[in-house]
Amino acid sequence: MNITVGVLALQGAFREHLHLLQRASEYILKNRLNARLDTTFVFHEIRTAEKLSLCDALIIPGGESTTISLVAARSNLLEPLRDFVKLQRKPTWGTCAGLILLAESANRTKQGGQELIGGLDVRVNRNHFGRQVESFVAELDLPFLHGTSSGTDAAGSAFQGIFIRAPVVERILPHVEGEQKGEEQRQDTVIAPSRQAKGVEARRALSKDVEVLGLLPDRIKKAALKASSVDGEAESADIIAVRQGNVFGTSFHPELTGDIRIHVWWLRQLMQHAEELENSSLTDG
Amino acid sequence: MAVHPQKSSNSDGVATTPDFTVKAGLAQMLKGGVIMDVVNAEQARIAEESGACAVMALERVPADIRRDGGVARMSDPSMIKEIQATVTIPVMAKARIGHFVECQILQAIGVDYIDESEVLTPADEMYHVDKSPFRVPFVCGCRNLGEALRRISEGAAMIRTKGEAGTGDVIEAVKHMRTLMWEISRAKSAYECGGDAALRAMAREIGCDLALLKQTVELGKLPVVNFAAGGIATPADAALMMQLGCDGVFVGSGIFKSGDAAKRAKAIVRATTHYQDPQVLAEVSQGLGEAMVGINCGSMAPSEKMAGRGW
């Protein structure tokens, strides 16, 4: 079984993702974390619709989200990307700018708004933390990495969350068929156009609710920013990782660390997904 | 829980501090993109709509600084703030070489990156700014490997070629990029043949830190992101610098000193993404109107060149 993973390479930190994917796949094969021993991985840089059509899964990297969306539109890639994520519902992971593009709704975008791909029923607040001087590194406790699923050397330790002019998930939206019309009424908010999912599997994936996979507690953020007042009361937290079916988004940058745990976890999800697809096509056939 | 570890490692597996990780990390997010010089909010909007990944806010583009002469300084903070209020992409600004107070001011108004730039008139003939203590990251120009590593040891989180700003002639940027690559390969073979001793001799010769030189040898590239700058005027120039191995491009006077700025800006952005695809490059190079009027670097006196500022 071969799994082809693309990394959108229009702008931003796509090489860093390819580098970690390579290391993560070597780790999986070396430690036989693949249930099926004939599993192989192929990784591609994606700049055209033709290349995208070869992929089973996609990463949209960190970068400048306005740039990625404008260049995608001018390279005739925006519609194929929407088809990939929403119509065919293939597994997709967005980091930082990628999370913004995968949101069904986003605010604080540039004048005149920006094009979104969509796929996650969330509203993202772009540059939530502010400008570069407010960028920070914080140690994250990510429950989905607990357990044996990613038994790498760093297993059990906190994950270095690198937040660079980062967005957060401001609100989980109710799942609706089609566009998030309610969101369109809001000031300074842009929404993604709708797509009908094709096929049983895609429709099943699309009907799933959004799960919160990671939180950044206020006290950790304040400590990372060396803020003077760290109050222990009334703990609030920002949502910094979400999943809806097979679409995954993180507001931080695992690709800027040397830590392969999330990439290993994600590749294992892809293997599971590929097996499910194979089994369902066998029973259907 | 240890909230603020002193050491972490980046994607190259190199040990680094959290502060430096976020500084160098923003540069990694700019890769494959175009950073455009703009002198007002209107130009900043044109740049943003064209797909620029950041803008450089300054009062006069290098071509005008060259024409006007006199002392070129940091821009008026009110003009930078207006641009910050207008666009959502990162906003960079220039400070004079060695002028750490201009840098303090730019940090105070929240610019996303400071360019300690030879395009402005240098303020100190002994020292570049000590960049490590600042929370805002810095980009600096270089003509060769020694200069790049000296700036990194002072705390620069991003490097660019100096090129020759405000000329529209790409020859100097090409020369600086080729010099850098040639010196990296020379360091690699020195290390392979003569180990630490040979590398130490080379570090002394080019005037840089041994540890940084060794890191460069191990990575086969600079330890930070490296953009092209100085004289880039066309989509083909941008793609040329990308094919030579740059991570992205700065375009200074090349856009807003040309006939159809919006169209040229878009074309250079697309050329930087699809730099390996001659079909796309041919398409975007068509009908761009008048390019900026160039100055041939070969006909300039050494004293007219900006690249010689700094060391």
Image (cartoon, rainbow, N blue to C red):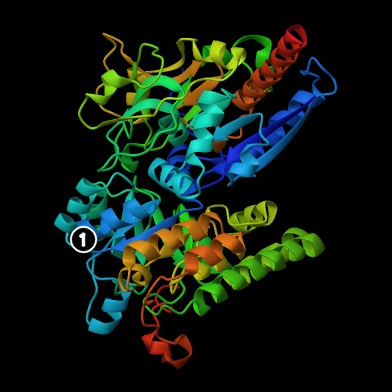
Image quadrant for the C terminus of chain A?
top right
Q: Quadrant of the N terminus of chain A?
A: top right
Residue under the point 46% across and 11% down = A211
**Relative height, residue A13 to residue B216 (above, below):** above
The answer to whether residue B151 of the structure is visible from this angle is: no
Q: Nearer the viewer, residue A134 or A55?
A: A55
Which sits in the foreground, A267 or B191?
A267
Locate residue B71 relative to residue A164 in the image: left or right: left
Residue A157 seen from this side: yes
Residue located at (70% from left, 12% from top): A276
Q: Secondary structure at mark 1?
A: loop
Q: Chain of mark 1?
A: B
Q: Residue at x 33, y 51 (%)?
A: B49
As rendered, which of A232 and A34 lies closer to the eye?
A34
- Residue extending farthest front: A285
Give the x, y percent position of residue B23. Answer: 43, 45
Position of residue A36 relative to residue A73, above or below, is: above
Provide the residue designation for mark 1: B40
Residue A182 lies in what quarter of the image? Answer: top left
Crowding near the residue tagged with mark 1, few <14, some 14–19, many ≥20 C-alpha atoms within 10 Å = some
Return the x and y of residue B102 as percentages of the image width and height.
Answer: 24, 60
Q: At which x and y percent is residue B117?
A: 36, 67
Front-most of residues B104 and A12: A12
- The kind of residue tagged 1 is Asn
Q: Residue furthest left?
A: B78
